[in-house]
Amino acid sequence: MSEKPTGSAVVVGGARGIGLAAVGLATSHVAAMTVLDLPETAPQVTEAFPGARYLQADVLDRASLEKGFALAAESGPVTAVFVPAGITLPTPLLEVTQEDAQRCLMINIMGSINAIQAAAPHLAAGASIVLCASVAAYTGGGYVGGPVYGASKAGVIGLTKGAARELADRQIRVNCIAPGCTSTSMIGDDPEVIATLSERALVGRLAAPEEIAQAALYLWSSASSFMTGAVLDVNGGIRL
């Protein structure tokens, strides 16, 4: 990502993990940054990106997302959106409760829908939206998430393709990344789990959050200008 957009960037779920890594990496590449996430405050955001604006928002609360994108648009039309917000659900299919399944599906799929809808009125022609799927979308879970989690991330891939088609006439690109196992709170710090997941990847380790975030920044940039409706696999060879 070599150019500096004149508009505004928004990371939905940027207070930790891959989202926070994207905020930090974007420092020299965007004109303005707005970060939306659940915590009331997020001092780590302003440390990663001096001048970034932070607003508490819930992906299931459209009004809070709309407020956040309106705030971002005060700095100019929104040109870049990244939505890594989501949860995992490791529970086996035959054991998962309806409540837990609905929560996972709602946050991971409806959250992305809400983010796109809230962003749409403020997007500049040529804007880039990046959603976040998972390698679990192809496998039905089996790494850190169960079948419902895998289904939710497969839904994100379907949403990416549909949104790309629908927004193409506005010259807005929509792509998604499908990360492999990454060193975030979703994986945790159990050495046995980390070792097992690392062995499954051809590169022999987990991804750093920054390695996944770099893929999102690539999809923001003009280097990916001929990509829309695409899924960019960043999984260290854990699935071939």
Image: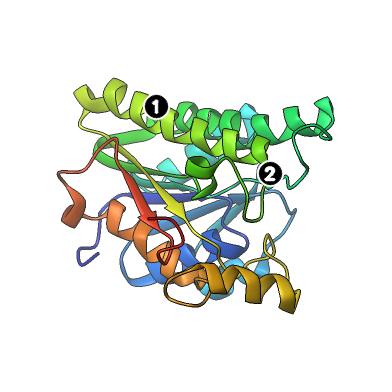
| Residue occupied by mark 2 | 146
Q: Is residue 156 above or below residue 166?
A: below
Q: Quadrant of residue 197?
A: bottom right
| Residue occupied by mark 1 | 121
Q: Position of residue 63 (x, y in %)?
A: 63, 28
Label 2 sits on what residue type?
Gly
Near-viewer residue (51 or 110)? 110
Which secondary structure lies at badge 2?
loop
Q: Quadrant of residue 114?
A: top right
Mark 1 neighbour density, 10 Å: few (under 14) some (14–19) many (20 or more): some
Distance between the alpha carbons at the discs numbered 1 and 2: 35 Å
Q: Position of residue 232 (x, y in %)?
A: 33, 51
Q: Position of residue 153 (x, y in %)?
A: 54, 39
Q: Are marks 1 and 2 in contact (CB under 8 Å)?
A: no
Q: Quadrant of residue 97?
A: top right
Residue at 37 percent of width and 65 percent of height:
214
Label 1 sits on what residue type?
Pro
Q: Is residue 100 left or right of residue 145?
A: right
Which secondary structure lies at badge 1?
helix
Q: Is residue 21 left or right of residue 186?
A: left
Residue at 20 percent of width and 31 percent of height:
171
Q: Please tell me whether mark 1 or mark 2 is closer to you in this view.
A: 2
Q: Position of residue 193 (x, y in %)?
A: 70, 70
Mark yes or no: residue 123 visible: yes
Residue at 57 percent of width and 75 percent of height:
47
Colouring scheme applied when the structure was drawn = rainbow
Q: Is residue 113 above or below residue 139?
A: above
Q: Is residue 145 left or right of residue 14?
A: right
Residue at 42 percent of width and 75 percent of height:
203
